[in-house]
Image: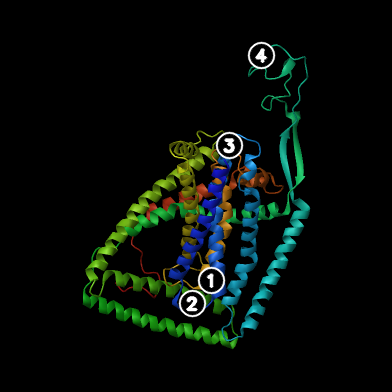
Amino acid sequence: MGDFNLALVIVAIILVVVVFVFNVYLLVNYQHPDDKNQAYFPKFVVVLGLSVAAISILMLPADVANRQACRHAIYNGACNLTLPMKDLWLAVYILDAVLVVLIIPFAMFYYEGDQDKSVGKRIGSAMCWVGVSAVVCALVLGILYGLIGKVDFTVRHLSSSTVAFPNSFSFSSGEPCINGSKQCAAYTANAASEKTWTMRATFPEYVVALATIVGSVLFTIFGGVGIACLPLSLIFSFVQRPKTVITRSQYIKEATELGKKAKELKKAADALHQEERSGSKGRKWRKNVKAVEKELLQLEDDVKLLEEVYPQGEQAETSWAMTVLGYLAKLVLGVFGLIVSVAWIAHIVIYLLISPPLSPFLNEVFIKLDDIWGLLGTVAFAFFCFYLLISVIAGAMMLGMKLVFITIHPMKWGATLMNSFLFNVGLILLSSISVIQFCSTAFAYYAQATAAQEIFGHTLESLRGIRYLYKYNVFQIGFIILAGLTFVYYAAFGWRRKKPSGRFQLSS
């Protein structure tokens, strides 16, 4: 048993290192050329935030494996040698909250500060903004914790009379108690036996709970949209793919048009920068900045499309072949993702929304996979949790392009600025808490008796003031409704080719 626990610790350390290295790889390849060899603090925050989000997702499978480590213990105290998962959960999510509330906003304010100012002034300005945010958050947390920071557990007071020890017991489902008493069985006890047990939640648990509520709102919106648009966008990307390359004359015409549009965009950006220096940063200026950002993104998409349909160089044929294979890969991944999305939605309906559940469904699948090989079910469990987080990111990216009140911060290979990185990392961190809470609820049968269930199941769902959101499945119902609407949207409009929506588009 001790050897098993030691192996679990070693695997956990290796995974942390792998996650860190992978996030450094993402940063290096996604960063914008303008950020190379500078903006080191925002880059450190990005790597740290992505690592915390990924580790928090991996901790739920680790929690399950940790529980299994002492399930068949043959000596007392075996479970004391396992990982202290409850302390680890609280540490990770307190760090999550600190990153979202303090460190990431500071890094964004510092990065977006006026480059003409000195480093000291930029730091001072960023600290002022973060300080105000921190004071407001601390006051809100303190007041809420003092007023309603309690947990109300609904329990039943059970009792039974005593009799002399009999030679044999004759209990049955109709008479489970001694001497015909009905107070020792929760299912047959009368309503008067139900009591409310109130206790004060610990402050770290309360912080995690409130962060989960905020994340649950984002998760319901972005996750519900993303779980449908993630696979369908890949499938319809294949449907709308370019079928053949264009001629050289067509390429010259399109490239000339894009060059003119790029010059117009540069003039607009220079004019906005001049207004910023003069101090006239009003509402109209911010609206124009967002418009220029949107047009710049559209221009970049047009350039990428033009490069796809007219590959150049000695490897032009190879480049076109790779483009075709890329779209085929999108189709395969889209179909596979659609199967996973349908499985997720079916599981939510069957196991969470219908009471009592019709079937354990995916819980039972994971258990059977564990019977085949010890970690197979855990790996599948981790995959479904990660898929949910990726769906949230996909939904945020889609709605960020459609809704005008959300700042557009796209993630593009080799063209992502640090402020976009930081914005998306903050979103991922907030959503990761809710993904874990959602998974611990959706897979309660498989992840039973874990530290995550203690925090996210019993405490969170009994917290005064918010427990009714979970009692009546508000977030799950909203998730299913948005997923259904997104499926309908793609079925009705996803197969159509996108029409030019702005000035910066390829000419027809």
Residue 407 visible? The answer is: no
Q: Residue at x 57, y 77 (%)?
A: 112
Q: Earlier in the sequence, mark 4 or mark 1?
A: 1
Q: Quadrant of residue 267?
A: bottom left
The amino acid sitting under disc 1 is Lys
Q: Earlier in the sequence, mark 3 or mark 1?
A: 1
Q: Are marks 4 and 2 in contact (CB under 8 Å)?
A: no
Give left or right: position of 213 versus 136. left
Q: Earlier in the sequence, mark 1 or mark 2?
A: 2
**Local crowd size for mark 1, using a 10 Å CA cut-off: few (<14), some (14–19), many (≥20):** many
Q: Quadrant of residue 468?
A: top right
Q: Earlier in the sequence, mark 4 or mark 2?
A: 2
Name the spot of residue 454 as percent of width and height, x first.
65, 44
Give the residue number, with chain letter if any, for mark 2: 35
| Separation of residues labelled 2 and 3 (CA atoms) | 50 Å
Observer-side mark, 2 or 3, equals 3
Give left or right: position of 8 versus 463. left
Q: Quadrant of the N terminus?
A: top right
Q: Which mark is residue 71?
A: 3
Q: Residue at x 56, y 48 (%)?
A: 6
Name the spot of residue 406 as percent of width and height, x first.
53, 66
Q: Which mark is residue 170?
A: 4
| Separation of residues labelled 4 and 1 (CA atoms) | 69 Å
The amino acid sitting under disc 4 is Ser
Q: Are marks 3 and 4 in contact (CB under 8 Å)?
A: no
Q: Earlier in the sequence, mark 3 or mark 4?
A: 3
